[in-house]
Amino acid sequence: MLCEKNLKPRVLKTIKNYSNDQKTKTNHDKVPATVADHYYNYLISVVLSGFKDIPVNLYRAIVEDTDYYKVLQLPVHELIDQEFIAAFVKKGELTLVSADQNLTTDNSICITPTGYLVLSLLASDYQELGLEGSPSFFSRQRNRFIVKINVKEETFVAGNKKYERVKKCLENNFKHKFDVIVSWDPPGEKVCPSSVASWFNNRGHKTFVCHQKSSKKFNSSIDAPDGDSEKLFSWMDNLPNSINNDGESDIKKDILYIECRGFFTRSRVIKIFNIMKELLNSSENTGDEFWGLHVRGFDNSPVSWGLKEHAVINNDGTNNYTVILKHSEIIIQKCLSSSSRPKNK
């Protein structure tokens, strides 16, 4: 039995004093790298100080063309179909994850935008599957195993020994089906993102369109902390509970808060971040204005950051980050689950 006293708390990792100077090329990609390494995002919130309404181009980046799709009872072997890989995994960016699975008690799957099919499997199902994997880092009892398959690999094609073995094992040995959510960023504007939904639908799988849910709040009397970045991070965490839509005449600071929930790809978040940075750089106010971007990940995805295995201890899937943008700097704070193995009593 796991001893909860030995479970370490969530870890906050802060990257400070990142210059916002366009000439600082060596550190310029730190924020995009953080965003690009986080694939499965279900909540985005944006905080703008000094604004009473959201700029049009930022609003469009947050809410327009953000539909995603849910496919019911999908066999995993469909995800290595050669036509599917060629059309959606190798072109554009495909992001897919099983829905409503508990990382502690259920199997879970995903396809990363980098082209990896990841299966997080209970020991009994892993043994029946017959593919090579590794024990879960967080399972001292070896009751969960992780299988990673690079479906973008050039040799992973029909007729190849490895491909045929994976296909045989998934078709014959693994009968589990998953409800999945999927989003596809096509390689060009002329290609419709819904093509991936049509592909599943044409294969006889029930497929539904899903819409993001958004809300906006404004307050003109918020007292925001100045200077200390740690206080600002803490203040932003509590902001959704403290802000309301009733403006007051005694203005301390205009604060606009926008929140969206659903399923957001990394390319969508990068787009939002880049527009925020451009707007801030072109802003005439160079004083104490700040903007914030908070992104929260799914707690049931098999991976959290990159191909890092997601912690399954008590189903604590903490993985989120906050970016604070100022005229002088950009500061990032990443919140992660502990990377320590649980100890036995």
Image (spheres, rainbow, N blue to C red):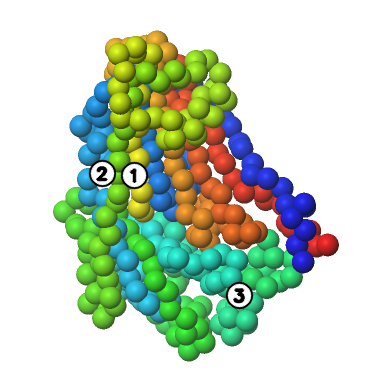
Of the pair 147 and 205, the residue shown nearer to us: 205
Q: Disc 2 and disc 3: Cα gap in Å?
A: 37 Å
Q: Is residue 319 left or right of residue 276?
A: right
Q: Under tag 2, what secondary structure?
A: helix
Which of label 2 and label 1 is nearer to you? 1
Q: Is residue 173 above or below residue 27?
A: below
The residue under label 3 is 122
Does residue 29 show up?
no
Q: Position of residue 118 (x, y in %)?
A: 51, 66
- The image quadrant of residue 191 is bottom left
Q: Residue 227: percent from the left, percent from the top?
A: 52, 15
Residue at x-position 30% and y-position 22%: 247
Q: Residue at x 35, y 30 (%)?
A: 244
Q: Callout 3, which amino acid?
A: Leu
Foreground of the two, 154 or 248: 248
Horizontal placement of 257 versus 61: left or right?
Answer: right
| Circle 3: element type | strand
Q: Which mark is residue 63?
A: 2
Q: Does residue 34 sit above or below 1 in this rendering?
A: above
For marks 2 and 1, give the CA distance: 8 Å
**Which residue type carries mark 1?**
Cys
- Residue at 50 percent across and 60 percent down: it is 301
CA gap between label 1 and label 3 equals 33 Å
User: Where's the C terminus, which quadrant?
Assistant: bottom right
Instruction: Using the image, tell me which numbered label, if any, was put on residue 260.
Output: 1
Identify which amino acid the numbered label 2 is placed on.
Val
Whether residues under marks 2 and 1 lie with C-beta atoms below 8 angstroms apart, the answer is: yes
Marker disc for residue 286? none
